[in-house]
Amino acid sequence: MAKKSQNQVLIIVLTDNCFITQDNIRTMMPELFLLGKCQVLRINNTNATTIKHWQKIASVISQQYDSYEGFIVIENYHQVIGSAIATKLSLQSNYKSIAFVAVKELNHDFLFNQKIDELNLRLNIINSLQLIKSNLQTVMIVDEDKVIDPLWTAELRTTDLQKYVSINEQYLAQLDQVITITENLKFLPGTLKLMDQFNNKIKIIHYIDWLACEKEDRQSKKTAGYFIYLTSTITIEELNSLLKKINQSLPIVIYNNNQTIINEKINTDVIYCDQYSYRANLIKISWALGNSKDKKSFNQLFLQK
């Protein structure tokens, strides 16, 4: 991707049945067009949890990459984390700001100066534009004054609250009077050429209270890999016994976010990780499966920093 900058921002809208249009934004947020040149592109978000939907986002950004200084993606709050993670994994050698902001499904009464379940769309768009001007070259989720790496993002949801936080309490930037960029993470290379439906070929094994239970393949397709999610303390003997029950020739990822396993060597060829969120690791597994031919190449892709 050749480096070009046209000093424009492309706003990509992925929510159906809402009124975020070029004219609507120009009327309700005239300051946005004083801060920068903006164009609005709407894409249908049918089947928003599928890999095809995520491929569409990355494809649009890739096609428009050289024409814009940065991108703001307005996505349904249910899907924003998955979309941001998949976009980050799929883009190669990214050097631009790509900000994801969440929005509820909106109706005719929507106004940009309203907070919808604490999702302040006006402020998030303005802050995203500032981040683009500050040249924070990464894919990020913007939630008011917090700028979060998608791989570390979690939802904080209650009856009347929808927020996004970092599970390791580290943020890419903090927005106040001055934007402070705290990190600029490396990107994983590769494309998002995955299976048709997210995680259809991944066996998910939850180890809960000494009981291993498999989440069966919804469409009974051939298993391509295993994701073992540890949620309670387990000994090395119990873990090795569990591993003997599955196909050792396939990729195996053990996720241990609660540090519940003792630090002994596991007697098999598995990937042991305690970084990022559960969702980020699951999407990362799908990405690595879709871009590898065997277990060795899968392991190399998954372990890239």
Image (spheres, grey):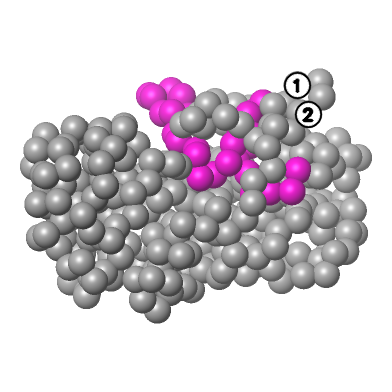
Which residue: 28% across, 37% down? 263
Residue 188 horizontal/vertical position (percent): 58, 59
Span shown in magenta: 136-162
Q: CA distance from mark 1 to mark 2?
A: 6 Å
Picture layout, residue 216 above or below residue 105: below
Are there few (<14), some (14-19), or many (20+) residues within 10 Å of tag 2? some
Which residue: 34% across, 71% down? 295
Image quadrant containing the N terminus: bottom right
Residue 100 visible here: yes
Which residue: 76% across, 53% down? 96
* Residue where numbered disc 2 is placed: 179
Disc 1 vs disc 2: Cβ atoms closer than 8 Å? yes
Which residue: 38% across, 41% down? 274
Does the magenta-highlighted stretch encompass residue 157? Answer: yes
* Residue where numbered disc 1 is placed: 176
Query: In the image shown, does 161 or 93 lie closer to the viewer?
Result: 93
Left or right, residue 10 beside residue 303: right
Does the magenta-highlighted stretch encompass residue 36? Answer: no
Residue 195 horizontal/vertical position (percent): 38, 72
